[in-house]
Structures are given as structure tokens and as C-alpha cells.
């Protein structure tokens, strides 16, 4: 469950950049990895408490992503998919190389502070404290996002800009700035997922490529740009993955991929999309 | 009058610079006889990039899972060989057919998708095949791969030498034949229809072109060609490992193609040697600088040089030509 929620946090970030902004953002995992590395590899060893380290890492990634968006992504809006794929894969390569140079090629061990390392008995059975924390943060973040998108003027303006950029600009919405903020938000969510998930999804330099497929598939299944659907799909994927590992250990990630491909081919617009939409 | 004919239709005419590439490839054989093994793998990757060009550059189908076709060819070739059939040419043809059949089976399902879902599915299929090959140790040897591919003399005449002279020329011949085929395909009505689909699938559908069938056929051709490249890699390395199926192989092919120039057939042929040459030296220096370099290169190409190296060359020629025209 907490695994599903983690995937969900990262994927929702990607839904923002990819689903709402229509950019094939294959570099999303890179932002998650940077967040994770900053929090676990840099700040925690310096003695910063984990919670603060995660917040700082998220802020740093958000700032960094605005720079990247202004420099590179602005040229991608409306460009061909090939360009988008190439450029974001290029970013992935650079981040992988950078992380390796900075932190070495091995999996980064992440130590939990003792207060989070134990487990709590909730009556039904004992749960690892950290997983519960992840669960709580996940619920709060997702709930908050839903509010932002559906209930605030920022969300409304963003959706307007995505639907009809020219019209949005004509009514006085500063679309480039809006997109920068949205991109920073998406990347910050990735960083949060990466940092929070470090103990569950091990950090290694190839992280940007390793979880790419999983996260992308969640976004595709949720129908590009639907926060609620992403939530369901991500949790579903988390459960299926865990169940498959538990019941069919020898087939590994295999079951999941087959299932996901069948689902995409069956419902290319997303699992929860109404059939009549096509 | 020819000015009015679309440049698409002139593609099959031989242009003056074209034989240069092939002459250089033959010259290499005599000038660097001690480095033929590396050059052979360059030719294999050039063929792989060429197949990807048919798919991406001409049909506009952006696949990130083309390594699957390459890998199927490689494994089928090695398995046929290890089962006792050592004749090289039929082995390659059978492997190409296997990859083509795979595309015919999968294509009708996945080519309905476009854009992001399609990219995702190709990534997913790549991951599935990699996982499957990794788990099916009894068939593929898993992590250890399949060593010990041995071949009968080519056409019963030429032995496979240690320095790889036979391999080099053998792969070069395959490349020439398939390149010629690719040229013919691209210039044929079918090829022109593909480019129409690339530019505007909706409109092609409206004027009555069987879009899905065209795409499936193009995918099958590209896949068979990639399978042949995979089979050649199995034969010339005498080994097949899991990496033939990995995402890295797909991305390598894509980067080579884009580096050389996409949608112009020679892109892969130029890109593969440049890419592998730079890779060779950068990796001796420090393997991670290589990733920096390639990432930077990709970003640079997207931002500043759409046509890759060939595009740069073209605009250079044009500029020089204009300079002469002014005088």
C-alpha cells in the first residue's frame, strides 16, 4: 500500500508535467533521483533531520527544475515527440552520470532515524512505522493536490492553459509562468517521492531509467492528466506488483508488465475514461 | 521539369557523394586490418540504426523497444546455430524472418496506438522480453548468455579468420544489400505512402490509404532488418548476451540515428561509426564522462541541429553554394 502511494506521488508529479503540459517527460525519474540523493546522500549525513532534509531537497529540486524548464523544456512545448524523447533522455544520461560522479556507482544505503525504524502495533498487526508515515504523507499530499487542481484558481487557470493556450493567454493568464510553476510542482512531487521512498525504492545512479517504465505506465493508464484516476491506478499497480511478487515470485516484474500492456492496448485513453470518449 | 517532381520520388537516383561511404568502408578493410572486429560491430549497429530509420524516420513510428527485434534475431540465430545448423546465410534469413513474424503478430495490436501510449507500450514490451530472457535460463542462458556460436565456411568457400576479414566483408555485403532494399522501399509508392502517414495519418486515412496495414508492413520490414542485424551480431561475436534486448540497445540505435541525421537512410551509416568511435575513446577516459557527453549531445542536436551531422553538412554545402552564386 505504501509502495503504491509512493509510486502515486511520483506519478502525480509526472501527470502534472506530462499529462497537463503535454510533454513526453522521460526525465521525470531523474528529478526523483536527485531529490532522493540530496535528501539521503547529502543532507542526512551532515546531521540534518530526515524530515527537514526531505523538505530542503524538494525545494532544491523545484528551484533546479525551474531553471531546466526555462532553459530546455520551453522549446519542447508543441515540438515533435521525437524531440521530446531525445531531449529528456539526454537529461537522464547527464543526471545518471552526475549522480555516479557525486555518489559512486553503488546503491546508496539509507538509514532511518531510530524513531521511525521500529514498528507500531495497530491492533490488527504490527506495521513498520516508516511505511505508516509514508502513507500519511501520501494521503495528505494527494488530498492537497486534488484541492489545488479542482478548487483553486491556480488549478483552473492551469487547466484552461492546457486546454487552449492561445485563449488562456488572451484572457490575461501568464501561461509561461504558469507552466514554470506547474513544472516545478511536478518535479517537486517527484523529488518528494524519491526522497521519501529512498528506504523502499533503493537509490542508485540508474534510478531514472529503472522506475521510468513503471511510472510512465501509471500515467498512461490513468489517462494523462486525471489526478483522481492516477491515484486509483497507482495504488492498483502497487498492489498488483506486491501481490505478483508474493504469489508468483519466479515471474518477477513480468506479470505486471504483461498486465499493463494488455490494459493500455485495451483502453488507450486510460482505465477510467468513459468508452464513449473515443 | 524534374524540379516539379517531389524530392521523395528522386530518392532512388544515385547522388554523387553516395559511393564515397562505401568506398571508405572498403578502404578501411585494407588500411586497418587489425581493427576489423570493432568495425564489424559498427557495421552491425549501422544496420540496426538503418532499420530504426525506416520505422521512425519514414513511417513516423517512434519505438523505444526496437532492441526486441534485434534481440529476437540474435537469440534465434544463436539457437539455430547451437542446434546444429551452421550455414550462416540461411541462419541470418531465418532470424530475420522470426523478427518479422514477431512484428506481424504484435503490430496490428500496438500500431493502433499513437503518441505517448505507443511509446509506453514499446518500452513495456522491451522490458517484458528482457525479463523473459533473463528468467528463461534453459533457453537463453540467462545472465551467462549463449556462447559458442560456430559457423560453416561462408558459401562453403571462405573460412572465418581470426582477424575477422571474412566477418567484416560478410556484414558489409549484408548492409549493402539491405541498404539497397531500403532505398527501393523508401522510393516506392509504399514508401511515399508511409511518409504521408508520418505527416498526416488522418488525411491518409481519408484519401483511402490502409494506414494500419501500411504501418504493420513497415514495422515488419524494419523488425526483420533489425533481426538480421541481431543475427549478424550473434554470428560475428560468436556470442549472444542479455544486453541485446536491453533498453540501452534501443537508445543507442536511436542516438546513432539522430546523430547522423534521421529520415535520410545514411543517418545510421554515418552516426554509428561516429558514435562508437567517440564512445570507445570517452570510455577509456572515464565511462561516466561518456554519459555526460551523450546527454549533452542529444540536447544539442534537439536544440540546434535538427538534421544531425548530415543536416549540418547539407547546410554547409548550401551556404558554400550560395557564396558561389553571389559572385
Image (cartoon, helix red, strand yellow):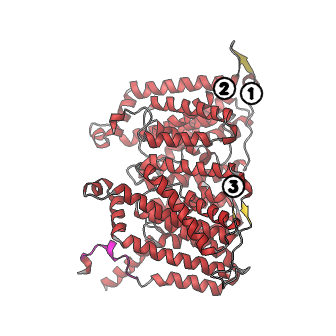
- Crowdedness near tag 3: few (<14), some (14–19) or many (≥20) residues, C-alpha within 10 Å: few
How far apart in space, not on screen, are marks 1 and 2 (Cα)?
Answer: 13 Å
**Location of mark 2 (residue):** A131
The residue lying toward the viewer, choosing from B253 and A159, is B253
Identified at 63% across, 41% down, the residue is: A253
Q: Which residue is mark 3?
A: B139
Chain label for disc 3: B
Q: Between residues B198 and B252, which one lies in front from this camera angle?
A: B198
Considering every residue shown, the one lying at the far top of the view is A123
The image quarter containing residue B58 is bottom left
Chain at tag 1 = A
Q: Residues within 10 Å of mark 1 (few under 14, many from 20)?
A: few
Residue B304 visible? no
Residue A124 placement (x, y as % from top left): 68, 14
Q: Are marks 2 and 3 in contact (CB under 8 Å)?
A: no
Residue B28 in the image: above or below residue A184: below
Amino acid at each position: 500500500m505504501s509502495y503504491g502511494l509512493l509510486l502515486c506521488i511520483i506519478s502525480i508529479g509526472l501527470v502534472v508535467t506530462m499529462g497537463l503540459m503535454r510533454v513526453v517527460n522521460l526525465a521525470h525519474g531523474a528529478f526523483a533521483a536527485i531529490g532522493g540523493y540530496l535528501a539521503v546522500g547529502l543532507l542526512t549525513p551532515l546531521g540534518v533531520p530526515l524530515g527537514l532534509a526531505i523538505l530542503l531537497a524538494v525545494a532544491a529540486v523545484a528551484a533546479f527544475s525551474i531553471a531546466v524548464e526555462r532553459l530546455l523544456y520551453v522549446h519542447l512545448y508543441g515540438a515533435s515527440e521525437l524531440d521530446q524523447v531525445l531531449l529528456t533522455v539526454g537529461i537522464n544520461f547527464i543526471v545518471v552520470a552526475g549522480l555516479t560522479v557525486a555518489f559512486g556507482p553503488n546503491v546508496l544505503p539509507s538509514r532511518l532515524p531510530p524513531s521511525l525504524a521500529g514498528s507500531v502495533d495497530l491492533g490488527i498487526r504490527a506495521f513498520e512505522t516508516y511505511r505508516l508515515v509514508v502513507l500519511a504523507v501520501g494521503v495528505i499530499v494527494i488530498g492537497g493536490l486534488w484541492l489545488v487542481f479542482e478548487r483553486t484558481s491556480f488549478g483552473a487557470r492551469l487547466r484552461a492553459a492546457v486546454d487552449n493556450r492561445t485563449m488562456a493567454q488572451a484572457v490575461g493568464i501568464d501561461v509561461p509562468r504558469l507552466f514554470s510553476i506547474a513544472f516545478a510542482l511536478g518535479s517537486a512531487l517527484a523529488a518528494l517521492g524519491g526522497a521519501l521512498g529512498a528506504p523502499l525504492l533503493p537509490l542508485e545512479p540508474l534510478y531514472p531509467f529503472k522506475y521510468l517504465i513503471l511510472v510512465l505506465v501509471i500515467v498512461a493508464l490513468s489517462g494523462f492528466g486525471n489526478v483522481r484516476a492516477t491515484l486509483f491506478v497507482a495504488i492498483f499497480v502497487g498492489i498488483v506488483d506486491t501481490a505478483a511478487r508474493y504469489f508468483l515470485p519466479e515471474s518477477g516484474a513480468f506479470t505486471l508488465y504483461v498486465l499493463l500492456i494488455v490494459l493500455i492496448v485495451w483502453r488507450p485513453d486510460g482505465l477510467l475514461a468513459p468508452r464513449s470518449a473515443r | 521539369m524534374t524540379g516539379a517532381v517531389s524530392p521523395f520520388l528522386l530518392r532512388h537516383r544515385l547522388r554523387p557523394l553516395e559511393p564515397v561511404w562505401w568506398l571508405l568502408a572498403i578502404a578501411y578493410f585494407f588500411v586497418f586490418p587489425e581493427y576489423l572486429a570493432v568495425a564489424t560491430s559498427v557495421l552491425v549497429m549501422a544496420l540496426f540504426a538503418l532499420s530504426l530509420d525506416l520505422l521512425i524516420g519514414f513511417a513516423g513510428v517512434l519505438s523505444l523497444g526496437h532492441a526486441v527485434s534485434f534481440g529476437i534475431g540474435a537469440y534465434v540465430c544463436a539457437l539455430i546455430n547451437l542446434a546444429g545448423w551452421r550455414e550462416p546465410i540461411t541462419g541470418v534469413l531465418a532470424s530475420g524472418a522470426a523478427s518479422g513474424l514477431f512484428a506481424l503478430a504484435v503490430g496490428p495490436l500496438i500500431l493502433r496506438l499513437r503518441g505517448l501510449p505507443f511509446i509506453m507500450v514499446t518500452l513495456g514490451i522491451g522490458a517484458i522480453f528482457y525479463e523473459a530472457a533473463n528468467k528463461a535460463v534453459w533457453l537463453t542462458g540467462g545472465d551467462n548468455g549463449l556462447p559458442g556460436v560456430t559457423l560453416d565456411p561462408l558459401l562453403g568457400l571462405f573460412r572465418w579468420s581470426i582477424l575477422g576479414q571474412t566477418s567484416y566483408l560478410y556484414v558489409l555485403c549484408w548492409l549493402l544489400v539491405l541498404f539497397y532494399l531500403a532505398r527501393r522501399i523508401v522510393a516506392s509508392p509504399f514508401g511515399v505512402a508511409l511518409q504521408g502517414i508520418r505527416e498526416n495519418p488522418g488525411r491518409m486515412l481519408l484519401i483511402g490509404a490502409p494506414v494500419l496495414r501500411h504501418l504493420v508492413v513497415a514495422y515488419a520490414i524494419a523488425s526483420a532488418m533489425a533481426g538480421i542485424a541481431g543475427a549478424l551480431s550473434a554470428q560475428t561475436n560468436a556470442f549472444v548476451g542479455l544486453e541485446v534486448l536491453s533498453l540501452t540497445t534501443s537508445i543507442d540505435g536511436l542516438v546513432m540515428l539522430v546523430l547522423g541525421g534521421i529520415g535520410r537512410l545514411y543517418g545510421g551509416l554515418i552516426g554509428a561509426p561516429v558514435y562508437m568511435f567517440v564512445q570507445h575513446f570517452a570510455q577509456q577516459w572515464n565511462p561516466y564522462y561518456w554519459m555526460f557527453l551523450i546527454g549533452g549531445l542529444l540536447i544539442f542536436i534537439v536544440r540546434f541541429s535538427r538534421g544531425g551531422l548530415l543536416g549540418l553538412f547539407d547546410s554547409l554545402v548550401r551556404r558554400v553554394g550560395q557564396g558561389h552564386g553571389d559572385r
